[in-house]
Structures are given as structure tokens and as C-alpha cells.
Amino acid sequence: MKFPAKDSDFRNFTAGSEVEISGTIYVARDAAHKKLVETVKMNRPLPFEIKGSLIYYMGPSPAPAGKVIGSCGPTTSSRMDNLTIPLLEKGLKATMGKGNRDKKITVACRKYNSLYLVTYGGCGAYLHQFVEKSEVIAYPELGPEAVYRLEVKNFPAIVGIDIKGNNIYNK
């Protein structure tokens, strides 16, 4: 699965499918999401191209010597449920974190042809090996809650909610 993505890229992925993500993805958590949604409401440009993008709910730890990033495991996705739909409306194609999402996110995934991906909680030290580049691109004052751009290769995940609204947590 490559990012940035198009609607047609997701046709063959169903809830429960194991995937590997490559390309450019973005990291944003609660504080950054609030700023992104405020920016959308003010009809101002976002700090990155949101169309076709994936936002990973993660707060990175500092990179050890010789590494691109430290531990980079997912955070609980439901904390962003009230801030996700305005970004999907702007063309966000996928979100990634851990745990179930509110029913409104399941409905929104179907409406906006987007995916919710789940990656492995408690495995942040393992997941860092799939990150080839990491840089802060917006809101540096937020520290680990800033917006980061990551270049990833074969980053492991599972489709939690597919574009038809099938949700692995409802099985």
C-alpha cells in the first residue's frame, strides 16, 4: 500500500487484511489535530497536502544515536474521533493507530472511501525500523505532538475499517 493514495487504491483491501505501507505518511496526535481542524474551519491551507494522505496517531520518542527515530508505536485512535471527519472531508485517505473507533468513523470511512489501519501497540521499538526518514513539518512548539512527515517502507498494519464500513472490532 503506497501513500499518497487514490480512492481506487483501496478497492481490494478488506477489514482484517494485513498490509505493508510505503511512501510518505504524516504523524499527528490530539494537539496537532485541534490545530489542523481549526485551520480547516478558517479555510486556510493545511501544512501538508492532505489529499491522498495517511495520518498516523503516534508520538515519537527521541532518536537514539545513529537512528532516524526512536520508539514510534501507535496511540489510541478514539481520542481523535471528534477531529477526524473534517480531515476526511478534505481528502485524507487513511488514519492509523490502535483500538476501535466510534461508529461515526466507520460510517465516514464508507462515505469518504478511506481506511482505518491498525498497527501493533506495545511494539514501538520494533516499528522504528520501518521509518527511513522523520522530520517535523508543523507546530514544532508541540514537541512530540508536532506534525511529522515520515518516509516509511513496508510498515506493517492491518485494515481495521475498510471502505465498505466493515470493522474488525465488530466481528
Image (spheres, rainbow, N blue to C red):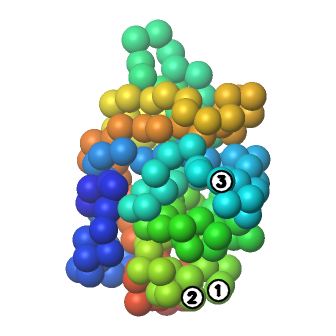
Amino acid type indicated by mark 3: Arg
Q: Identify the disc placed on residue 44.
A: 3
Q: Quadrant of the N terminus?
A: bottom left
- Residue found at x 74% / y 50%: 35
Helix, strand or loop at mark 3: loop
For the residue pair 17 and 164, the one nearer the viewer reads as 164
Amino acid type indicated by mark 1: Lys
Q: Identify the disc placed on residue 103.
A: 1
Residue 3 x, y percent position in the rendering: 32, 54
CA gap, disc 2 and disc 1: 6 Å
How crowded pointer 2 is (Cα within 10 Å; few <14, some 14-19, many 20+) is rated as some
- Residue found at x 41% / y 89%: 164
Left/right placement of residue 93 relative to residue 104 reads left
Q: Nearest to the eye among marks 3 and 2: give it.
A: 3
The image quadrant that residue 68 belongs to is top left
Furthest residue toward front: 43
Among numbered discs 3 and 2, the one appearing first in the sequence: 3
Residue 38 x, y percent position in the rendering: 75, 57
Q: In the image, is residue 88 above or below residue 34?
A: below
> Which residue bears the numbered disc 2?
107
**Label pair 2/1, CB-CB below 8 angstroms:** yes
For the residue pair 47 and 105, the one nearer the viewer reads as 47
